[in-house]
Image (cartoon, grey):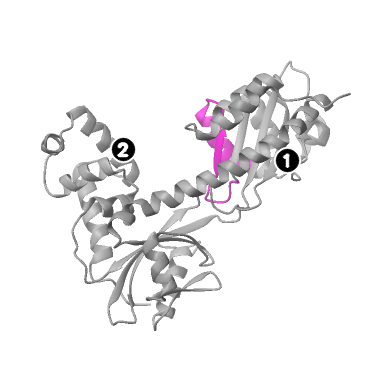
Amino acid sequence: MSTPTPPIALIQTLFDSLLAEPPWLDFLREMETWLQGHHGAMVLRRPRPGDPGTLISTQSNTAALTVLQEHMFSESPILDLPLDEVCILSEMLSRQELTSRHKRFYAYIQEYGSVEDIIGVNVEEAETGMIFRLRCARLTGQPNFSGEDRDRILALLPWLRTAVSLYARLARKDYQLSISEAAIGQLTIGSLVIDEQGQVLITNPVAERALEAADGLALARGKLVASGGDKAALHAALRRLFDRETGSVSETLQLARPDGRYWNLLMRRTPARPGLDERVSRTALLLFRDAGGPREVSEELLMELFGLTRAEAALAARLVQGESLSDAAESLGRSRYTARAQLAAIFAKTDTHRQPQLVSLILHTISQLWGEASTDT
């Protein structure tokens, strides 16, 4: 029997979906039709304790997805499969084995999706270490997946590997741009992302120059260190930030530079994002600036601190300056509807709910970064 060739429409949708928002979803829907399946899903980052991971799914039941990510993934017999091996749940385990060894998982797939069988494959992107877990299900009343279905997925694998490679690089590049875009214009704010071991994952141009010149910060075997006499202080601050039991959300620190000036550092713990190494589960964003520099609330600074777009940052800056939402909208030449929509987006990104709360958060965060940072260890 000749190897089945995936339809051109499926392959085209596969690559087109990489640029869609959310990515992969259009491909998953097309794959469901192709396999006569349901609940197509792509796990972009494996869930861990305290980290629900990243899941793209055609499943519209939000409650079901929440239960899956927070509770059921750890009990799934079909999460961590051998790489590039197409596996079928009904071939891996009999119904009796599934119900006895994975009772809660079986009850979940029956309750939320009437799932009788699952087919899946795990693909690794070598450069970033990301593992992509593709899944599709058959429901009650449908036949189990067969060897023919396995051959279909195997035939798709070359295109899937290429798509995975492209997506991983695009995701990483987007992340790099998101933390460096603002500073490129100002060239005053250093930004870098590190993992729990202190490995530097992403830098912007300001941070790159500081690291190359060992200007208060440097690299030692890829790990971030203080290049002066504050090594212990930086190490202690990062240890407090990443402590799994009592870790702080943010830390501030002042680091000496060779010329006698200082960097003010603001360090914030952040969840790992798609585009980073699969092994990374916790990261921190470090922002630093000359302690003697101006302390204005600039659009660039708000973009860097809170991930705002330039339009959102311009609005937030006006609000911090004391303008009402109506006045800010008028001075920026925007409609009230647009300003309200942008304010809602700002609230979501800053986890605030009212304007006074937003302004207070911005001023407090900026005072941490530009104010008198603690040098205690």
**Figure check: 82 above or below 18:** below
Look at the image and give the residue range highlighted in magenta: 46-73
Visible residue check, residue 271: yes
Which residue is painted at 58% across and 46% down in the image?
Answer: 47
Residue that label 1 marks: 77
The quadrant in which the C terminus is found is bottom left
x%, y% of residue 38? 65, 23
Q: Amino acid at mark 1?
A: Pro
Label for residue 169?
Answer: none
In magenta stretch: residue 322: no
x%, y% of residue 106? 70, 32
Q: Amino acid at mark 2?
A: Ala
State the CA–CA distance, disc 1 to disc 2: 39 Å
Mark 1 residue element: loop
Visible residue check, residue 286: no
Label 2 crowd bin: few (<14), some (14–19), many (20+), radius 10 Å = some
The answer to which quarter of the image holds residue 335 is top left
Asked if the residues shown at circle 1 and circle 2 are in contact, with their CB atoms under 8 angstroms apart, the answer is no
The quadrant in which the N terminus is found is top right
The answer to which quarter of the image holds residue 214 is bottom left
Which residue is painted at 11% across and 38% down in the image?
Answer: 331
Which residue is painted at 74% across and 45% down in the image?
Answer: 83
The answer to which quarter of the image holds residue 294 is bottom left
Q: Is residue 119 left or right of residue 249?
A: right
Which residue is painted at 32% across and 77% down in the image?
Answer: 375
**Figure check: 336 above or below 311:** above
Label for residue 345?
Answer: 2
x%, y% of residue 71? 59, 41
**Figure check: 184 above or below 257:** above
Q: Is residue 107 left or right of residue 226?
A: right
Along the line of sight, which residue is nearer the eye, 150 or 213? 213
The furthest residue to the right: 1
